[in-house]
Amino acid sequence: TGVHGTVYSIRDNPKLIVKQQPLKYHHREVPVALYLSKKHVIPMIYNVYDGKRYGYIVQERYDGTLGNIMDRKNPNISKTGNLSMKNRTKLKNAVRRFHRTGVVHLNMHANNIVYKKTPRGLMFKVIDPGWAVKVKPTIIGGPQVKRETEKLARKMFPSSPYNIGVAV
């Protein structure tokens, strides 16, 4: 459950979840989420529904969030509370793939990065692109994109102390 929506497990299919959110947030998130799902940088979206008051996104289920992994009791991390180098690289690559799409998340934090256990280890993807915006094609990750991102963040979240580090 987040600020703008609730996520439900599907009893008949444990590989899927349903995200329910008010239509005003749903209509903002769906176009960019569908674009990112096709680019394989967020969990796969299988269907989208509009109800009278809520919108629904049927999406691939992941095992947990980076916030869960950072919990020192989690068996996926070392006893010191750090991700292994291999998993740090996978995490960095997931964020890099996201930004290479030309989309800036504007709300990226540990609970908006999910992981799935696979035979090849952990796989990371970014979730919840409700505030994400597509930026003009430039050198992705360059100083111009960082300036554009920070400008957007200050405009959208003028009172937020967190908009300084949005260009992860």
Image (tube, rainbow, N blue to C red):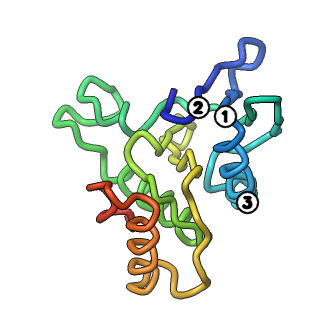
Q: Is residue 59 left or right of residue 156?
A: right
In the depicted structure, whether residue 135 falls above or below residue 48: below
Q: Mark 1 points at which residue?
A: 22
Residue farthest top in this picture = 11
For disc 1, the neighbor class at 10 Å (few under 14, some 14 to 19, many from 20) is some
Asked if the residue under mark 2 is in contact with the one under mark 1, i.e. CB atoms within 8 Å, the reply is: yes
Q: Which type of secondary structure does the marked residue at label 1 adopt? A: strand
For disc 3, the neighbor class at 10 Å (few under 14, some 14 to 19, many from 20) is some
Q: Nearer the viewer, residue 119 or 125?
A: 125
Q: Mark 3 points at which residue?
A: 35
Identify the amino acid type marked 3. Answer: Tyr
Which one is closest to the eye, mark 1 or mark 2? 1
Asked if the residue under mark 3 is in contact with the one under mark 1, i.e. CB atoms within 8 Å, the reply is: no
- The image quadrant of residue 168 is bottom left
| Residue 107 spot, x, y in % from top left | 45, 53
Q: Which mark is residue 5?
A: 2
For the residues labelled 1 and 3, the Cα–Cα distance comes to 20 Å
Which one is closest to the eye, mark 2 or mark 3? 2
Residue lying at 37% horizontally and 31% vertically, measured from the top left: 68
Identify the amino acid type marked 1. Answer: Pro
Identify the amino acid type marked 2. Answer: Gly
For the residues labelled 1 and 2, the Cα–Cα distance comes to 7 Å
Mark closest to the chain's N terminus, 2 or 3: 2
Mark closest to the chain's N terminus, 1 or 3: 1
| Residue 141 spot, x, y in % from top left | 45, 78
| Residue 104 spot, x, y in % from top left | 52, 66
| Residue 1 spot, x, y in % from top left | 51, 26
